[in-house]
Image: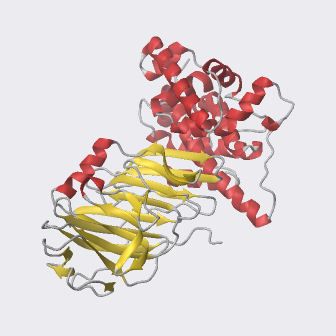
Amino acid sequence: MIDDAQLLHTYVGTGDEAAFATLVQRHQGLVYGSALRQTSNAALAEEITQAVFIVLARKASTIKPGTILSGWLFRATRFIACDALKAEHRRVRREQASVAMNSPSNDSTAGANESIWQEISPVLDEALTRLGEKDRNALLLRFFEQKNLAEVGQALGIGEDGARKRVERALDKLRGLLGQRGVVIPAAMLSTVLIANAVPSVPATLTVGAALTGTAATAPLVKGALGFMAVSKTKIALAAVATLLVLNTGVLVTLLVIQNHRGRQRQALASISATPKVSRLAPSTLSDASGFVSLFNGTDLTGWKYNTQVWSVVNGNIVGRVSPELGMQNHCLIWAGGAVDDFELHLKFRTIENANSGVSLRGVESYGNLRGYQAEIEGNRTGLFVIGGPGRERKLASAGWLTVAREKNGQDILEKLEPLSDAAQVAQARLPVGIGEWCDYVVIAQRNRIMIMLNGVIITDTTDQHPTKFVPRGLMGLEYTHNPGREDSVEFKDIQFKRLTPANPQ
């Protein structure tokens, strides 16, 4: 049997539609099944399936050698299904209709095996997304493509015995993730149910061709996916694509993680969407200055509220500094432009080693300082996101992770969902902070989703789901906290600000 890589190579090189049709026939069950589980809507799942393969046709030449095609298709399906669901929700709201969707898997008379599948199906793709890529590919190959272990091992380059161990470990991890969503199932039964149900029969109404244009129904999905998967002329690298359907909270989270090549630090921001009321945050760069305004004129602190004994302009840079002998003091340079809600902020900063500073946002003024959200600038804590103030102290992020901050049984909790940047990347991004070099800092806030980039690396991407402590609007400023007995200071320059239109205002 001709493998996927050969078929892709043939299609890209010659435009052979027969090769592409073989890929469609081979993988359409996987794609349709994933779309159906996510939407519980057979008609919408068909549209998504068509869109996924249209995107594959257009992006086939960009797929790197060695890529597991089922993994690529799974990620594309997750993204397109997320967009389709949001569009469907908007349509339903406009028509003031019920959001209930019909699904053949909801038959209460189903047997025990089908009942188990009904429990697994709604949370399966979210759990698969949270697996590592190697584990996810092993399960996709074994149960969704229904390859034997020898074929799985060949595809993964680990041999049959290695494939067996990989699949077993991946099943255990998947069981654990399903358990977190309240679905408890033995490993042997999980594999049986996956084999029986993971790839449903494709409806006769589903037709997918190799044409590079879609129907009117699929066109918006294709356009969104192509924009999402585009590779820029500045060699922005697509590092990860994940969509997470967080059940039992009604929150739909879509994540596009783009990691810069070193030296392209001001380009590439993430698409952000959290809750059905929020649309994706379109990427912006300083090379496209549309909408950005400079908050610092390089000469004086016009437009800012500040303590003249702390803040000044030296050599064209904003400087925060006090005498070492003074005690612990917090000082905030508050932007006088009024309250902010959704925005994008770019700046450069430089600190003396271990100096404590940060960007305050959506804060409340109290005796010249801002209480509330803060993007940290402090040595190896730089890039973290916290909220401060009496009775409100909370850790809202974990370095290098997609996180959700929420409440459970009256307690504040922080849940890690997906790794974004590994420890080495985070450490490298923070290295210039400790040695007093100029660093690039980007903060994006849209609704309850906050992303922070340091020197081109995503340090924080978090969603604040706390029912009472989430802050949608407030003042913005730059903070400097003096440590007694230390010669410390902080400098800022190149401060660029852009208001973002609130998504789906209610």
Image side of residue 241 versus residue 440, left or right: right
Q: Is residue 11 or residue 451 the one in the foreground?
A: 451
Residue 368 in view in this figure: yes
Q: Is residue 299 or residue 246 the one in the foreground?
A: 246
Where does the image place residue 469, in percent across and percent down from the top left? 53, 64
Residue at 46% across, 40% down: 61
Residue at 66% across, 33% down: 183
Vertical order, 69 against 400 (above or below): above
Q: How many marks?
A: 0
Where does the image place residue 420, in percent across and percent down from the top left? 41, 46
Query: Quarter of the image holding residue 359?
Result: bottom left
Where does the image place residue 51, in percent across and percent down from the top left? 63, 46
Q: Quadrant of the C terminus?
A: bottom right
Image side of residue 473 versus residue 428, left or right: right
Q: Is residue 330 or residue 127 the one in the foreground?
A: 330
Residue at 50% across, 65% down: 446
Vertical order, 208 against 278 (above or below): above
Residue 294 in view in this figure: no
Image side of residue 436 versus residue 55, left or right: left
Where does the image place residue 216, in percent across and percent down from the top left? 70, 55
Vertical order, 160 against 80 (above or below): above
Q: Residue furthest right?
A: 109
Q: Quadrant of the N terminus?
A: top right
